[in-house]
Image (tube, grey):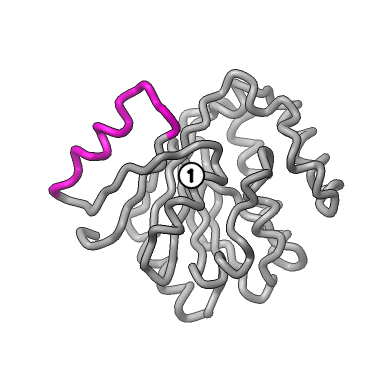
Amino acid sequence: MADTEVFVADAGSTDGTAAIARSYDNLLNVRVIEGGLPSVGRNRGAAQSTSRYVLFLDADVELRDRTLLRRAMTAMQKQRLHCQTVDIACAEGTWADRLLYWGNSRMQRLSAWGMPFGTGMFLLFERGRFHELGGFAEDAVFAEDFLLTKQVSSLRFSVLDGCIYTSNRRFHRTGHARMVFLFFWTLLNCKNRSHFVRDHGYWDGAATETVSKA
């Protein structure tokens, strides 16, 4: 891990994110780069990466399973995958938070049989294929992860056994019912490019900080 490039895309955070990230310089190869909306920050990290694979993570994600990254890399190489994601959990959330993340994970697994979608909370990409697909669409201000991953062949997409943990900030900010509506409305509009360039009120009052790792 000491030689692995870690890019922290900082979108003007005010909570000391950049300083905290740099405090790990003695353990990790960390660089803080200018962020923006998720697509922008992630693309900037990927553009500077020199590795064969690039992993995108959100800022509030925890990797509690110490075997997860090793298993993910092994699966990518053995199965010659282009993209891989994992289940999402919310250990400290309410029953409603946990239920919705469970539902999201089930939909991810079902999608792998036809039109894959993966959440930007954890996306492991083969970097060459990532660039062939054009990366994250920077004019997309909503569901940019869905817009990208639905282009991946189902034969080269997988959901790894295991999970990452995230917060329930999305539900606090947007509301449970609204998030469910937006999810299914996006599925119905998956071929409507204009749907993704509207924020649908998702970013109202929200910080745009995101972390991308390569």
Magenta-span inclusion, residue 164: no
Query: Mark 1 is on which residue type?
Result: Gly
- As drawn, the residue found furthest toward the left would be 26
Query: To which residue does mark 1 refer?
Result: 41
Identify the residue shown where x is 66% and y is 37%: 100
Residue 193 position in % (x across, y down): 80, 49
Residue 55 position in % (x across, y down): 44, 57
- Kindly state the secondary structure of the residue where label 1 is placed: helix
- Dot 1, crowdedness within 10 Å: few (<14), some or many (≥20)? many
Boundaries of the magenta span: 11-26
Q: Is residue 145 left or right of residue 208?
A: right
Residue 8 against residue 178 in the figure, above or below: below
* Mark count: 1
Identify the residue shown where x is 19% and y is 38%: 23
Q: Is residue 63 left or right of residue 192?
A: left
Q: Compare residues 4 and 141 and report the one nearer the observer.
A: 141
Residue 49 against residue 213 in the figure, above or below: below
